[in-house]
Amino acid sequence: MNNYFSLKRFSQLFIKHTVEHYRTYFMSAAVLAGVFLLGGSFIFYMIPGPVDAGFQMAIFGVLILIAGPLFTSTIFTDLGDKRKAIPVLTLPASQFEKFMVGWVYSYIIFMLVYTGIFYLVLSILLNLKQWPGHHPEMLSLFQDKSLLVIIIFSLLHSITMYGAISFEKLHFIKIGFSFFIFYALLILADTLFLRLIVGRKIYPATPFAFLNFPEGTNFYSIGLNEQQSAWVFIAVPVVVILFWIAAYFKLKEKQA
Amino acid sequence: MIQISNLNFSYNSKKPLFKNLNLSLKAGHIYGLLGKNGAGKSTLLKNIAGLAFPQSGKCLINGTESSKRLVSTLQNLYFIAEEVYVPALTPGQFLERTAGFYPAFSITDFYSYLKILDIDPDLLMTKMSYGQQKKMIIAFGLATNTSLLILDEPTNGLDIPSKVQFRKLIASVLNDERCIIISTHQVRDLDSLIDTVLILDDHRIVVENSVDELTEKLFFGVFKDLTGMNVLYEEDTLMGKYAILENTAGKYGKMDLELLFNAATTNSSKLLNALKSATLHE
């Protein structure tokens, strides 16, 4: 018997999870649709002109980066409640299968549902408010900015998933708090490290961002060149994968 | 089946719960794990089931560390927690989605246990009373036919007729391949059900004896006068002295689990020494 992964067992677990949680997920999707509809109506009403694809992309990106971690933080809440954690942890499925069900729901299914609802609401709003002589423009996700959104979403997803397993309650608040504390420490460490390298006073610096410093009355900003910047796009997915792996091991170590 | 060796566990580094605890449990027995509130009964059961990890020492189920939570181990283990959780499904729907994980699950047994415990298979479990939810989980746990069944305070929340049914059911599902561990602080609930008594006190197992062994070595009774008797433990009652004596005459008597529990947890050294020497002789 395979103690690590069996497609049949994974499917059984996926169906069991769906049957036991679909009400909550439907309600979450309905709330998301409500937020889009209300917020979207407000924006469409307030802006004195057609909402262009650039603005739509900004809304799409900002909201997925808020809604995604919010949903991901709830995916393992059962583990924080001993009554629910015991049947989950002792169910005869591997810890990897249990992790994958949470991952598929919070990453793949969330992205699909989010995108579907976004386009549904967007098409409703575009049809409701039309500008004479202007052909309504709809956002296309097949562009470079989408990749950036997916990378940032993946980073937040992996961090949130780790927190969702680690914390017992108030997952979203605790993850957010830890994230900002960690980010502040990262900036501090990065700034001190860069000061050590350049041997001068610099402005606070975030990893992979510009190195800013004043020189007399001048202000200098040093950045990575195009080729070096490409490394950022490799470094972030590596961090994402490492956080997913860490989250899996956190689940393996979870006690009830 | 279960081998615990040199188990050390604590939630707080200053207060260890178990110190070098050793225990060996075999199939074909119903073990009653007794202990005062906070003695660590639930924690010990969780260590056995791989839900809590020892700081040091090992907890093995059929030679495999339970903390690894391998599927092959989990398929042979069902843990009924003190506080149960049920999803918003009927027992029938729950069976459909969960039974497949347990290779030896018996659907016929499940419905028969539900009937015995008077549970409607078509009622949404979230609409059931707490006692009914617990009975439903007990019925499911028994029907999994796992070789290890762990029940943590199973009688909490059950009414008197249900407790009687529960005892009958547990006794009926025991076989040579199955090991059942029941923990409780309501000692009387396990009377005439268990065949081996485990008493947890002061970070260790102080009593680990079969009921036969205990009735052979000890004699329980009410006495007007205990002068000249080899008394291991006594309590005053309205009828006289309720006591545990060393059974040197080989008399047959019924064991009083509550009296034994009181004796063991009040550190009756005489009783513990008598039992220790009995175990050593064997």
Image (cartoon, rainbow, N blue to C red):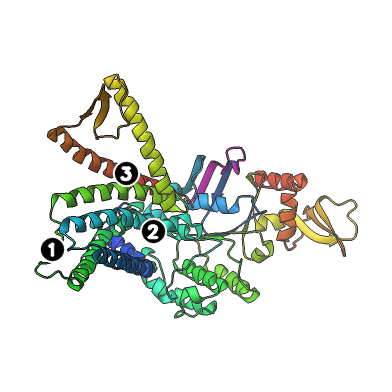
Label 1 sits on residue: A137
> Going from the N terminus, do you reach mark 3 or mark 1 first?
1
Q: How many marks?
A: 3
Element type at mark 3 = helix
Mark 2 and mark 1: Cα distance apart in space: 50 Å
Answer whether residue B180 is magenta in the image. Answer: no
| In the depicted structure, whether residue A149 falls above or below residue A228 | below
Mark 3 burial class by Cα count in 10 Å: few <14, some 14-19, many 20+: many
Looking at the rendering, in which quadrant would you find the N terminus of chain A? bottom left
Give B185 or A256, whichever is nearer the viewer.
A256
Mark 2 burial class by Cα count in 10 Å: few <14, some 14-19, many 20+: many
Q: Which residues are magenta?
A: B1-18
**Residue A92 numbered mark, or none:** 2
Mark 3 and mark 1: Cα distance apart in space: 38 Å
Mark 2 and mark 3: Cα distance apart in space: 25 Å
Answer whether residue B5 is magenta in the image. Answer: yes
Residue visible at 31% across and 21% down in the picture: A196
**Residue A243 numbered mark, or none:** 3
Element type at mark 1 = loop
Residue visible at 37% across and 47% down in the picture: A162
Specify whether residue B47 is in view: yes
